Image (spheres, rainbow, N blue to C red):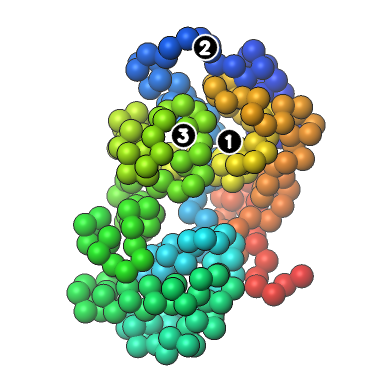
Amino acid sequence: MTEKASGKKASESGRGKPAGAGKPESRTALVRRARRIDRELAEVYSYAHPELDFENPFQLVVATVLSAQTTDLRVNQTTPALFAKYPTPEDLAAANPEEVEEILRPTGFFRAKTKSVIGLSKALVEDFGGEVPGRLEDLVKLPGVGRKTAFVVLGNAYGRPGITVDTHFQRLVRRFRWTAETDPEKIEAAISELFPKSAWTDLSHHVIWHGRRICHARKPACGACPIAPLCPAYGEGETDPDKARKLLKYEKGGFPGQRLNPPQSYLDAGGKPAPPLGSA
């Protein structure tokens, strides 16, 4: 779907107001609307994928820990040097912390992150034979790994469904009025009741991608939003289609994405690889 088409769609169907706006929504109606939103997002982001570069579960769990309080782009620009020097849990577990800190400095909070990734590497070596476990209860025992990180790993490295409740996901599900909860675990529980388990991982990608590209925290691009007719929060952001299109990010705005090595489906959809660290 082109951005002009997205903006046109947003301007139709009652200027983005869902049917029955202002009336109490039944549980059945909520489920139907939520699933329709996901179907619409699946069409818009048919190429959605994890926005962290990784080649194996170890790289993914480390990259996800490093992504706290920074962008996936900055992590992707940093991890090539990290994994070139420390390709295995055994290597990183035995690393000199000061050398790791220097590599991780661009990601921010580099001392705490160094402690976490070395600690989780030691735990992998000592408790799991150097392999990243494929169970939630084991993953959350690793230093720096909470439920969000665990579900990223389970869903994208092992194909086991999980809902990734990051800041974008939290913001959008409340804007969609899928839930009013603010606690991540309560959000996870509420959303899991609206969708079949098999949809959880892709749902997470769809919502997070939409939050990063169109439904921004401060200036959502309502006028360029393909799901505006289904969104109770339509009008919180810019509703003029032309002005809204100028707010779009990444491939939706014609800019590079966050991965240095994105999948071919992303490139086929017009996406551009991110530049390496230090490039102009």
On the image, numbered disc 3 is attached to which residue? Answer: 173
In the displayed structure, 93 sits above or below 116; it is: below
Q: Say which residue appears at 55% left-offset and 61% top-offset.
A: 70
In the rendering, at what x and y percent does residue 63 appear? 45, 66
Going by the numbered disc 3, the residue's amino acid type is: Val
The secondary structure type at the circle numbered 2 is loop
**Mark identifier at residue 22:** 2
In the rendering, at what x and y percent does residue 256 appear? 68, 56
Q: Do tag 2 and tag 1 residues touch (Cβ < 8 Å)? A: no
In the rendering, at what x and y percent does residue 189 appear? 30, 37
Q: Quadrant of residue 75?
A: bottom right
Say whether residue 264 is left or right of residue 120.
Answer: right
Which one is in front in this view, the residue at disc 3 or the one at disc 2? 2
Which one is in front in this view, the residue at disc 1 or the one at disc 3? 3
Q: Say which residue appears at 45% left-offset and 48% top-offset.
A: 166
On the image, numbered disc 1 is attached to which residue? Answer: 44
The secondary structure type at the circle numbered 3 is helix
Going by the numbered disc 1, the residue's amino acid type is: Val
Q: Quadrant of the C terminus?
A: bottom right
Q: Residue furthest right?
A: 242
Say whether residue 244 is left or right of residue 154.
Answer: right
Mark pair 2, 1: CA separation: 27 Å
Q: Say which residue appears at 57% left-offset and 59% top-offset.
A: 71
Q: Nearer the viewer, residue 88 or 183?
A: 183
Mark closer to the chain start, 2 or 1 = 2
The secondary structure type at the circle numbered 1 is helix
Say whether residue 217 is left or right of residue 98.
Answer: right
